[in-house]
Amino acid sequence: MIYFDKVSKTYSATSIALDGVSLAIEPKEFVSIVGRSGAGKTTLLKLLLAEEKPSSGEVYFESFNVHNATPNEVIQIRRRIGCVFQDFRLLPSKTAFENIAFAMEAAGAADADIAVDVPQALELVGLADKAWHFPNELSGGEKQRVAIARAIVNRPDVVLADEPTGNLDPISMREIMGLLKSINELGTTVILATHNHDIVNALEKRVVTIESGKVVRDDKKGRYMIK
Amino acid sequence: MATGVTIQRIIRGGFMSFWRNGWVSLTATLVMTLAVFVIGSLLFSNVLLTSALSQIEGQVDISVYFRTDAAEQDILAANAAIAQLPQVRSIAYVSRDDALAKFRARHAGNALITQSLDELADNPLQASLNIRAESPEQYEVIARFLESSVYQAIIDKVNYFQNQVVIERLSKVLSAGRAVGLGITIALAAIAVLVVLNTIRLAIYVARDEISVMKVVGASSAYVRGPFVVSGALYGIFAAFITTVLFYPLTFWFGPQAAKFFGGLNLFHYYLAHFFQIFLILLSCGILLGTLSSVIAIRRYLKV
Ligand SMILES: Nc1ncnc2c1ncn2[C@@H]1O[C@H](COP(=O)(O)OP(=O)(O)OP(=O)(O)O)[C@@H](O)[C@H]1O
Ligand SMILES: [Mg+2]
């Protein structure tokens, strides 16, 4: 479903983020991308979202070559990918409800559907009572749950989670991971980038280890090995 | 996608972000008010300048004095011939009797003059034609016509030739005044536009992360841009309202003083008489400035 074909990304002579990465991800998989800070995890996800262009190689989302796609196709691809970031990236001047609704409005959903789906998504992440709070009136864990609700509200095929627990306490961390797991069990592909061993080891799912921009391990039921 | 719903969402989004980003909106509106105010002031000063200049122009004329022995019908024939010239805006005939009556009226209090006039057997004053041209530089043409015409014989003198230097200089000053006015107008308007553009650019720069999130979440560029353009229009609309209201006390206070100083019309009366035109001009300038600035400023952040 997602295929990285010998992808390299060089930001500048001193920062080579990815170096000949090839990687295939099947539908409904839960893949953890692990590696030290600066290994190139975020870059990999940005390439899939077409936020960055690869220096060489190709990225495929189903039949689309992401970086040869028209702007309109890029929009369509993005609507099928939900994103969760370490720093949440919520819209600060919109409430929790509006943040989630924005993803649907942008995709042209009908008002009637928005009125049904957004409360459902809020319910799912356990924030029904904070629907009208602005991001600055929410805790970090709550913000991340809003972000997850936004990522899944359009029923995407893939959810990208880039260090989604990086800024959270252990309890919120477990909640977020629980949500990602249940999203995956409902049939959505999840790609998680992290450098947290405990999380990865507890998952017992596929683990791809990146080191200095190269894939060094790819284990079906893997663990995050520390040298 | 239903475009009606989308447009509705964009407009609602624009109003919402205008209202919720209160400080940014307030700042942008104030800067925009400044710019619209500059444009409005230029409008008013242009009106003032034009009316003052035409007032001055109106005071320039030339007079043709006829010999006292000229027959009145010849003078009237000359009057008719001059009136035919395309350069002539108006012409007024002052007969010898009229001239005398005016002279007496002017010196009614001076016994010496009235007495000496009474003692004269004949009216010593000359008949004259007062000519106004369409524009100051045309007096020369009219004067040349008089000099070379058949009426040369009955003409005693044309005061253009006495005033030639003054009239020429005045006509130069007037056209220079217009050019300088236009130059200042363009320069100030350009500065105002640049300041607004940079303020809105800053407001959008602050929102650049939001813009990239919106794009990553799957919004089209047009859908992201829309609310910013609506906010830009709102800055312009409020600025136009504020400026139009501000001009009431300003012209009320400044109008009569300017009228006294420059001559020409009272700006307050002009403001009242052209209220809606002024408002509409300021409104369209404000909206145009706000929306265009937003469109230009957001362009680079939409490339994500
Ligand atoms: N915009 C950029 N310009 C230049 N260099 C960059 C840019 N973004 C990332 N890099 C470099 O690319 C390399 C990989 O960065 P990336 O963000 O992908 O790492 P990461 O694995 O996500 O790290 P972390 O775990 O800290 O988030 C780093 O060396 C970084 O310095
Ligand atoms: Mg990262």
Image: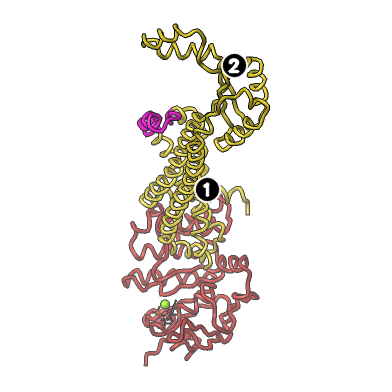
Relative image position of residue B145 (x, y in whole percent): 64, 32
Relative image position of residue B12 (x, y in whole percent): 50, 47
Q: Secondary structure at mark 2?
A: loop
Pair 2/1: label in front: 2
What is the magenta segment's predominant secondary structure? helix
Q: Are marks 2 and 1 in contact (CB under 8 Å)?
A: no
Residue at the image point whose x is 50% and y is 79% from the top: A44
Relative image position of residue B7 (x, y in whole percent): 57, 49
Which residue position holds label 2? B69
Which residue position holds label 1? B288
Residue at the image point whose x is 58% and y is 21% from the top: B66
Q: Which residues are magenta?
A: B248-268
Q: Is residue B266 magenta?
A: yes
* Precedes in sequence: disc 2 or disc 1: 2
* Amino acid type at mark 2: Asp
Question: If the image is split into quadrants, where does the N terminus of chain B sit?
Answer: bottom right
- Closest to the observer, A83 or B131: B131
Q: Tell me, by letter, which chain the rendering colours yellow.
A: B
* Amino acid type at mark 1: Leu
Q: Colour of chain A?
A: red
Residue at the image point whose x is 58% and y is 36% from the top: B140
Residue B11 lies, with reference to residue A141, above or below; the image says above
